[in-house]
Image (cartoon, rainbow, N blue to C red):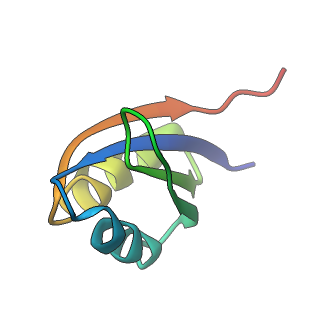
Amino acid sequence: MTVSAYILVQTEVGSASDVAVAAKDVDGVVFVDAITGPYDVLVKVEAETMDDLGKKVVSEVQKIQGITRTLTCPAINL
């Protein structure tokens, strides 16, 4: 079973498109979309465990040039 999370991303002004393109190249990212509102990019990521997911967010997604802040929202099964 895999775990997944949605990452709401704020970017530097004018860099949302570059961040979205770079996020698509991260292993485990299954969906990326530019959005409007307080966040600029929505990223869905999957991993084998919650620990792996957290490591992926911190070591890969958050290091993308142009990202200023992220909010990670783990998905749950109801």
Residue 43: where, in percent of width, then height? 50, 54
Outermost residue toward the top in this view: 78
Residue 34: where, in percent of width, then height? 48, 58
The number of callouts visible is 0
Residue 9: where, in percent of width, then height? 35, 45
Query: What residue is drawn where x is 29% and y is 74%?
Result: 18
Q: Nearer the viewer, residue 42 or 29?
A: 42
Residue 10: where, in percent of width, then height? 28, 43
**Hey, which quadrant is residue 74 in on the image?**
top right
Quadrant of the snapshot with the C terminus: top right
Q: Nearer the viewer, residue 14 or 48?
A: 14
Query: What residue is drawn where x is 54% and y is 60%?
Result: 33
Query: What residue is drawn where x is 16% and y is 60%?
Result: 66
Give left or right: position of 75 versus 14: right
Query: What residue is drawn where x is 68% and y is 50%?
Result: 2
Give left or right: position of 46 versus 55: right
